[in-house]
Amino acid sequence: MRGRRGDETLVLCVLVFCNTSCIGAFGPLLPEIGHTRALADWQLGVLAGSFGFARMIADVPSGMLAGRRLALSLIVSPVVLLVGLLLLAAGGSFPVLVLGRALTGVGHTLSMVAGLTAILKNDHGASASVRLNFFEFAGMLGVLGGLASVGLVPEGWGWPVSMLIASAPLAVPLALIPELQRRFPERALHHEAASARPPTSERTRPIVWLMFAVGTLMALAWSAVAQFLIPLRGAREFGLDRGGVSSLLALSQIVDLAVLLPVGWLADRVGRLPVLGVVLGLLGFGVWSTGLGSFSWFVAGCAFLGSGMAGWMLPLGVIREHIEPHTLAWRTGLYRVGIDAAAFLGPLVCGLLGEASSGAFLALVGLAAVVAGARLIWRVLA
C-alpha cells in the first residue's frame, strides 16, 4: 500500500510540475504585456486577477468532479490550460487576454483540486505533511522552470513566443493520459460519490474555519506581491528588465523549495499549527519588505515571501485532521474558493489603487499575517 501511494504521488507531482510552468511564465511578462497592449494599471490588475477569479468559480465544481471522476479531472486540466495559453499568446484584445488568463485558472484548479484530493485521502502516517509538501515542491519547481525559461529567452522574441516556449512541458501530461487512467480508475462506489457532495449535518469545527481564513490570507499576500507588485515595482521603480524581475520571482521560489520539505518534516514532528504560525510571521515580513522597503529590502522581502509560502499546504493538513473522510473533496473545493477569491482580489485591489498607492493595503495584509501567526503560536502554547 505504501509503495502504491508513493507511485501515485510521483505521477501527481509530474503532472503538477508540467501544469505550473505556464503559471510561472506569466508574472515576468506582465509589464511587457501592459506596454505592448497599452493597458492601464487597473486592466493589468484585472488580467492578473482573472486567473484567481476563474479558479474561485471552478473550485467547488472541480471538487465535485474530483470526488466522482478523479482521472477525468487530471486528464482535462492540461487541455484547458493549453487552450487558455494559446488565447493569451494570440495577443488579441483585452477581453481575449482576460479569457485566456481565466482558462489557465480553470485548468490549474482542476489539476490542483484533483491532486490534493488524491493525496489527502491517504493523509496518515509519519510522512503525511511531507507528501503534501512534495506535491507543492513539484508545483514550485514548475513555476521556477517557467520563470527561468522566460528569463533566458531573448526579449526580442516577444512575450507571446516567450510564453509558449516556457509552457512547453504542457505536452507531457497528454502522454500521461493512459497512466492516469490506470493509476486513478473511476469507481462507482457509493462512498466515492458521496465525497463529492456537501455534508448535510456535520458541524464545521472552529479550527477548520480558522484554517480557511489563514489560507485565504496567505493567498491574498502572495497574489498581491508576486502577481502584481514585484513585476511592476521592479520594472518601474528599480528599472529591472524581464530577466531581473524573473530573478527576483525565482529567488522567492528557490527559497520556498529550499525550506518546503524541512517545513513538512518539522510539521509532522512538532505539529502543523506552530510551524504554520512561524511561516505566517515570515510571510508578513515579506509583504512589508517588498511593498514598503528600499531595493535591498525589496530583494530580502522576496526571500521572506518564499519562506512564508513554504507553509502553503499546512492549513489543508489541519483541515484534514478535523473532518470526516467522506467530506474531503467537497471541503477541498470549498477551501480553494477562499484561496482563489483572495488570489483574484490581491492584484485587482493593487491595480485599482495603482502600483504607487498600494503601500497601505500591503501594510495591512502584512500586519494581518503577523498577527495570525502569533495567534496560532499562542494557541499552541496556552
Image (tube, rainbow, N blue to C red):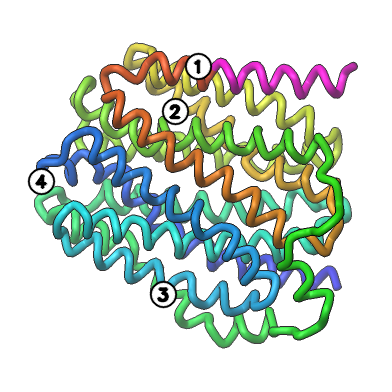
Closer to the camera in the image, 64 or 17 = 64
Distance Cα–Cα, label 1 vs label 2 = 18 Å
Distance Cα–Cα, label 4 vs label 1 = 33 Å
Name the residue type under label 2: Cys
In front: mark 1 or mark 3?
1
Where residue 376 appears, x then y in whole percent?
76, 24
The label shown at residue 36 is 4
* Figure check: 64 above or below 359: below
Q: Find out whether residue 85 is within the magenta segment.
A: no
Q: Quadrant of residue 271?
A: top right
Where residue 127 appears, x then y in whole percent?
81, 52
Name the residue type under label 4: Thr
Q: SS for tag 3? A: helix
In front: mark 1 or mark 2?
1
Where residue 12 appears, x then y in whole percent?
61, 67
**Disc 2 marks which residue?**
302
* Figure check: 380 above or below 137: above
The tag earlier along the polypeptide, 2 or 3, is 3
Q: Report the magenta residues as a range.
A: 367-382
The label shown at residue 364 is 1
Q: Residue at x 29, y 46 (%)?
A: 47
The tag earlier along the polypeptide, 4 or 2, is 4
**Disc 3 marks which residue?**
79
The label shown at residue 87 is none
Distance Cα–Cα, label 2 vs label 3 = 32 Å
Relative horizontal placement of residue 203, taking residue 13 as reference (left or right): right
Distance Cα–Cα, label 1 vs label 3 = 38 Å
Name the residue type under label 3: Val
Closer to the camera in the image, 215 or 170 = 215
Name the residue type under label 1: Leu
Q: Residue at x 84, y 68 (%)?
A: 2
